[in-house]
Image: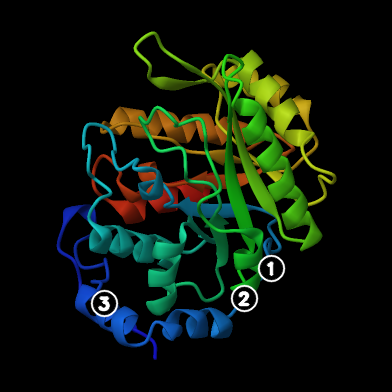
Amino acid sequence: MRAGRVAGTHTEGGDAGRRPRVDVAELVRVRTHHPEAIAEAAARRARRPLLTGTGRLMIVAADHPARGALGVGDRRLAMANRADLLERLCLALSRPGVDGVLATADILDDLLLLGALDHKVVMGSMNRGGLQGASFELDDRFTGHRPEDIERLGFDAGKLLLRVDYADPGSLTTLESTARAIDAMAARRLPVFVEPFISRRTPEGRLTNDLSAEAVTRSIAIASGLGGSSAYTWLKVPVTENPDDMARVMETSTLPAVLLGGDVGDSPEGQDAAYEKWRGALRLPTVRGLVVGRSLLYPADGDVTAAVDIAVGLL
């Protein structure tokens, strides 16, 4: 039984009259009485190729909550309301030019029950063990989708986060487990999107990612060489602190890449600046699209539709 698309609209922000309302009680009822419905929905999901004729990808990311990363700008728990998040995701996925979604199993299961994933690229998030702010944040173990889960459910790709701290010996374990995950995905001919960073802790113990040209270049070089085959490896990369450095940075690898979004804050100026950074980098030959979450799902003006449509237009 499918939970179904529930009629009704949401009356919040810039999407008044357009956002579908998610019936949480119905989702819980199906999960309680017929948990097999999730696998059944996955089995009948209408699939599509990873790339269409444009050769470009526009993926909406929503795997942040599983790392305890719930904040958007100054709103520390912006992503904590699951019904609200699902409504935003369903709206984003309904917009022309949006190819699919990146999320953890709990969110993808809900979207399957809502019937929102037909003809969409579905990307499973693989390692979420490095909880935001934890002493073990860099020990980013594979606590999400396994390669066999992605294959079993008929999903289209996986994504993993690779943060390397040269001062942390544990980064070697992260590198090794990442390489084996890449091998397992390649054995199944499934694309895997690797999101690499050079990271370090501040004197206060907070983990930060180095977005200098040198650090991003180094992270791309490391990620590109992992595993026994790079045939199915994509990169998911940030725009450098100085966007003018991106052309040189992206010369580091021939692997196809997508740009990540990150948290652009709560101001319209931050949103506009992000669009401009993406616009320039999307012209580079290895950059094939965007995988963006919070800045599109929780834009400063509340208008998800407009934010998504502008991002699609950049492609």
Q: Secondary structure at mark 3?
A: helix
Residue drawn at (26%, 66%) of the image: 19
Residue 185 visible somewhere in the drawing? yes
Q: Secondary structure at mark 2?
A: loop
Residue drawn at (57%, 19%) of the image: 168
Above or below 260: residue 188:
below
Residue at the disc numbered 3: 28
Q: Position of residue 136 (x, y in %)?
A: 44, 31
Earlier sequence position, callout 3 versus callout 2: 3
Identified by mark 1, the residue type is: Pro
Residue drawn at (65%, 65%) of the image: 148
Q: CA distance from mark 3 to mark 2?
A: 26 Å
Q: Residues within 10 Å of mark 3 (few under 14, many from 20)?
A: some
Q: CA distance from mark 1 to mark 2?
A: 7 Å
Residue 95 visible somewhere in the drawing? no
Q: CA distance from mark 1 to mark 3?
A: 31 Å
Residue at the disc numbered 1: 49
Q: Position of residue 12 (x, y in %)?
A: 16, 57
